Image (cartoon, helix red, strand yellow):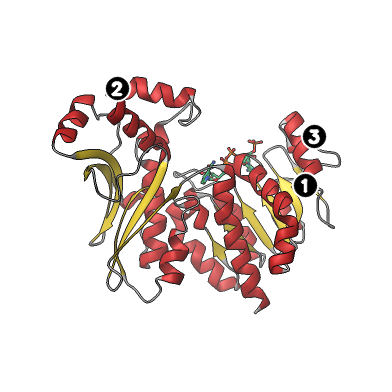
Amino acid sequence: MRINLIGFGVIGKGFARALVRKRTWLREKYGFQPEVVSISDVTGTVVSEGGLDLEKTLSSVERTGRVIDCPGAEEMTGLEAIREVDADLVVEVTPTNVDTGEPGLSHMLTAMEAGKHVVTSNKGPLALEFKRLTETAKKNGVHLKFEASAGGAMPLINLANEILSGDEILSIKGILNGTTNYILTRMTKEGTGFESTLREAQELGIAETDPTYDISGSDTAAKLVILTNAIMGKNTTYRDVKIEGINRITPEAIALAKEDGYVIKLVGTVENGELEVAPKLVPMNHPLNVDGTLNVATFQTDLAGEITIVGTGAGAMETNSAILSDILSIFRNSRG
Ligand SMILES: NC(=O)c1ccc[n+]([C@@H]2O[C@H](COP(=O)([O-])OP(=O)(O)OC[C@H]3O[C@@H](n4cnc5c(N)ncnc54)[C@H](OP(=O)(O)O)[C@@H]3O)[C@@H](O)[C@H]2O)c1
């Protein structure tokens, strides 16, 4: 399988490292021999029709921080690489934008229109244009897979649509953002205020320099939309979600909740057709009460009852567990 890799940041590099690390295992276990034929970042593209030497590309980009500095790299954009470099599948891992979906939206549409499968961790395009993207995949007879976009390493979409395929999923409740869960956990355990706990999370590299997207609940909302559409067959968009973030939560509110046996968590909920992200009181002994940067989701199903899955929602290797699983599923499907 020939792959165009678009985006070479935390996840793109993690993908290359995972392939290097698991090359022999993938060949021996599945007969799977992926070749990354192009890698693009915002500066340019490096191409090798026969498959790039990933270790060399990684060490070159680690030295300079830019794909354009790799030997033989060209000023070719990711979009041009998708159009011009022959491949079966595009791994799209550029930054998320929930206002326009770009540049990921154009990358994904162009790839599928060119007959290429797409695997992505990029939430923005899916949270805005889910229907258009899935219809484009269908029309062109290709797969669009995005397990990594909601819940990182937790196999939520595949769990619901494959393993629980005989069940109707009636509602989803989840903690889908590790940064906010870390902040709320520390505030609960240490009795600290929001601002100082956020600063601590930034110093530890858990929160971004600009944490707005996480703190405001937008990141959770984008993931909730993806889960709702992919699992419940709906056509919602990011704009349908009622969103409240965590910046107004005080140590006093947390202490009061604690006295009554509750913790405050940022929970994304889809129930009776309504999508909401808001701080909620969760009983201390409830499965949704997970600590630190962990994520969790509970499905209410019609046959199996309640199913809860806990796991790591982000990280280079963890997210690539989902990306690799999607690619392998396409590989198995296309072999018949
Ligand atoms: N990090 C995580 O743990 C995690 C977990 C789940 C999902 N995700 C999602 O996965 C995606 C990638 O995340 P990340 O952490 O790897 O982001 P990142 O470190 O910021 O990397 C993004 C990469 O995309 C490149 N890029 C930007 N615009 C581009 C364009 N027009 N064409 C080609 N490349 C372009 C960037 O190039 P430059 O560096 O040259 O600007 C960079 O190489 C995001 O959508 C994110 O929301 C991330």
Please state, as top left, top right, bottom left or bottom right, where the N terminus lies in the image: bottom right
Seen as rendered, the residue at the extreme front is: 285
**How far apart are the alpha carbons under marks 3 and 2?**
45 Å
At a point 48% along the width and 46% down the height, the residue shown is 100
**How far apart are the alpha carbons under marks 2 and 1?**
44 Å
* SS at badge 2: loop
Q: Are marks 2 and 1 in contact (CB under 8 Å)?
A: no
Q: Is residue 187 visible?
A: yes
Residue 188 picture quarter: top left
Residue under numbered circle 1: 54
Residue under numbered circle 2: 192
Amino acid found under the numbered disc labelled 1: Leu
Q: Picture coordinates of residue 76 (x, y %)? A: 75, 45
At a point 49% along the width and 50% down the height, the residue shown is 152
Residue 306 picture quarter: bottom left
Comparing 120 with 31, the one in front is 31
Amino acid found under the numbered disc labelled 2: Thr
Q: Kindly tell me whether mark 1's CB lies below 8 Å from ligand 1.
A: no
Q: Nearer the viewer, mark 2 or mark 1?
A: 2
Position of 111 compared to 237: left or right?
A: right
Q: In terms of sequence position, does the residue under pointer 3 or pointer 1 come before the other?
A: 1
At a point 41% along the width and 66% down the height, the residue shown is 160
Please state, as top left, top right, bottom left or bottom right, where the C terminus lies in the image: bottom right
Vertical placement of residue 8 versus 2, above or below: above
Dot label at residue 260: none
Residue under numbered circle 3: 69
Q: Picture coordinates of residue 11 (x, y %)? A: 60, 44
Position of 55 compared to 261: left or right?
A: right
